[in-house]
Amino acid sequence: MPRLSTGQSSTQPKTVDEAQATPTRCGHVALIGAPNAGKSTLLNRLVGRKLSIVTPKPQTTRTRLLGIAIEGPTQIIYVDTPGIFAPRRRLDRAMVAAAWSGAADADQTVFLVDAARGVDRDTRRILDRLAERGRKSILALNKIDLVRRESLLGLADQLSREGRFDSVFMISACTGDGVEDLKRYLAGALPQGPWLFPEDLLSDMPERVIAAEVTREQVFLQLHDELPYGSTVETERWEDKKDGSARIEQVIFVQRPSQRAIVLGEGGQRIKAIGARARAELERMLERRVHLFLFVKVRENWVEDRERYAALGLDYDV
């Protein structure tokens, strides 16, 4: 399966002399934070294209996702991680473990804090864990467009006095304010070395996985609080047609028959609406026509299925 790419080079061609005079840099940057801090929105902004799904629901991101961007001679590999919170279930524990694993393996860590929410219990827990690790990180106060300047400066001062940050940035992932400054800083902070991916690649995640995430986003957005988090989407079949279009068959798995009825809706109207919006989003992302077919199946207690965790890239045994 081809991987999602820009389809064109993201940098101007360099002469041989320029290439030799400018050493390349490359490294991983983990984006960590409490649920709904804006990590996925920031990833999409930094990469310049939607890769990670975004919904008002906390804990939407379930696994690590790589987003790749070029800034001058630097290839920045962003790692979008699940929100860090106090886990209660096996899936919660696996998601939080994936987030901390992404931070441990990264060259730089950006700790994203919702400036409008301030230092809540989840944020304090992350601060304490960062202190235990003994590594400094980069603080990004997000959603500054929603906060008065006096409150923002007070929060920045409070967190800066924690003494655990190399630098502090005030950004809005939604509007883009301050994001380019953060990106330039990261580009200069990564180690020298060869690029790890082709320069036109946006993510190493297979298109069929990204397509399943797009549909899961629509399930969350359209069902709101009607459907618990115990649902997932898998792409079962992908066929590239001769006319350039793609035929995609996906299954929305739920845990109970009553949940299946919710997804289908009266006369199948809900599943049709989910499919229509997911198809439109996929056509924008893939830049080609998509024939999307959705099915809803009951898979009882899939959140305890070891194979599902492997498919999500999560550790079942944490």
Image: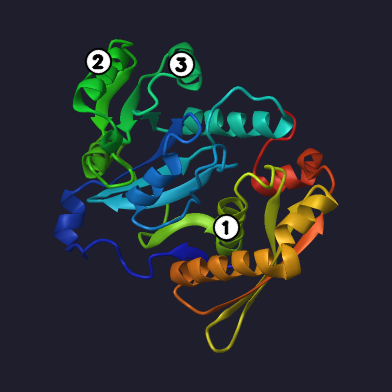
Mark nearer the N terminus (1 vs 3): 3
Classify 30 as above or below 13: above
Mark nearer the N terminus (2 vs 1): 2
Q: Residues within 10 Å of mark 3 (few under 14, many from 20)?
A: few
List x then y, in percent, for residue 28.
Answer: 41, 39
Q: CA distance from mark 2 to mark 1?
A: 39 Å
For the residue marked with disc 2, what is the amino acid? Asp
List x then y, in percent, for residue 197.
Answer: 42, 55
Q: Are marks 2 and 1 in contact (CB under 8 Å)?
A: no
For the residue marked with disc 1, what is the amino acid? Gln
Quick check: 55 left or right of 266? left
Q: CA distance from mark 2 to mark 3?
A: 15 Å
Q: Quadrant of residue 95?
A: top right
Figure quadrant of the C terminus: top right
Determine the residue positioned at 43% across, 34% down.
37
Q: How many marks?
A: 3
- In this view, the mark in front (2 or 1): 1
Residue corresponding to mark 3: 124
Residue corresponding to mark 1: 218
Work out whether residue 302 or residue 183 is closer to the camera in this orientation and state it. Answer: 302
Residue corresponding to mark 2: 157
Determine the residue positioned at 72% across, 62% down.
265
Give SS at disc 3.
helix
